[in-house]
Amino acid sequence: MMAKTEGFIIRTTDYGESNKIVTLYTKEFGKIGLMARGAKKPKNPLSAVSHVLFYGLCLFSKGRGLGTLYQAETLNAFRTVREDIEKMGYAALVLELTDRLTEERQPSESIYHLLQAILLLMDKGKDPAVLAALFAIKMMPQAGVAPELTHCVHCGQKRDNYAFSIMNGGFLCQNCIHTDAYAIHLSPVVQKLLPLIQSVPMERVGRINLKAKTIGEIESIIYAYYEQNAGIKLRSRHFLEQLSKFRTE
């Protein structure tokens, strides 16, 4: 059965001497694997499109197993992202998280539109670290580990001052902080931002600007939370950490 749809390539795997398997995330079909025959050959038309962060229209055959990619037409080349190694690192993080948190052939319009909006904003020059953090927080329900950010996760009371408990899954008030010896003390701005990021509509995302120290505090919470509660350690996160060390030396 032939199909044509818009999608993002979120992962590629070399297969044999000349082929690639591309993982395409689409609105209609969800995540699907496709064989791109000859994609490793420079003169093959598929070689220019069979890469991570491709976004465009794809013509392919699909069945119960691996489909076959026949044609692909780029809709946005994401040149602004590709020309900056840090932006590309954050885009890779978003794509890796999409891959890790979705199942084959389980479409979700909300995830597709979130992925699309985040990457397009990144390409327009919006802060990639903020966008990646926002994406990661909004994908936590998909991972089944959405934190409680409206009241104390232990006593249920709303307070003015919270710490964050990775172990308990959300805010802890000062009366309950003793329940987690490893609770993370939060700056006042991060206490306000975490629930805001969790609930902010996508049309307002591009207006968020944060200081490097603030986004660093948020990132350390997000990715430790994913690792402990969802068992997800992101390879692209490690790359960004190494890049940060390199740039500060």
Image: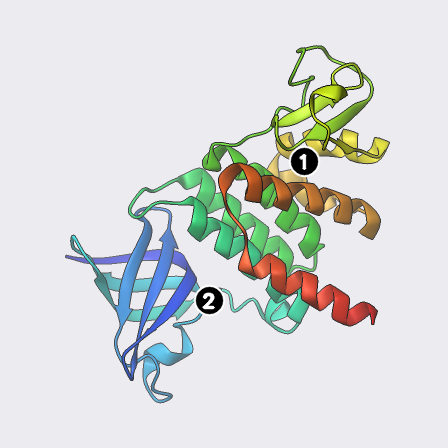
Residue on which the image places disc 1: 197
The amino acid sitting under disc 2 is Val
Question: Label 2: few (<14), some or many (≥20) within 10 Å?
Answer: some
Residue 56, x across and y down, in percent = 41, 63
Instruction: Identify the element where label 2 is drawn.
Output: loop
Residue at (56%, 66%) from the top-left corner? 78
- Work out whether residue 127 or residue 148 is closer to the camera in this orientation and state it: 148
Residue 15, x across and y down, in percent = 29, 75
In whole angstroms, how far apart are the C-alphas of marks 2 and 1?
Answer: 27 Å
- Work out whether residue 13 or residue 112 is closer to the camera in this orientation and state it: 13
Residue 20, x across and y down, in percent = 32, 73
Question: Considering the image in quadrants, where does the N terminus appear?
Answer: bottom left
Q: Looking at the picture, does residue 55 appear above or below residue 249?
A: above
Question: Label 1: few (<14), some or many (≥20) within 10 Å?
Answer: some
Residue 142 circle label: none
Residue 52 circle label: 2
The amino acid sitting under disc 1 is Ile
Q: Looking at the picture, does residue 105 appear above or below residue 168?
A: below
Residue 48, quarter of the rendered image: bottom left
Q: Do the residues labelled 2 and 1 touch (CB within 8 Å)?
A: no
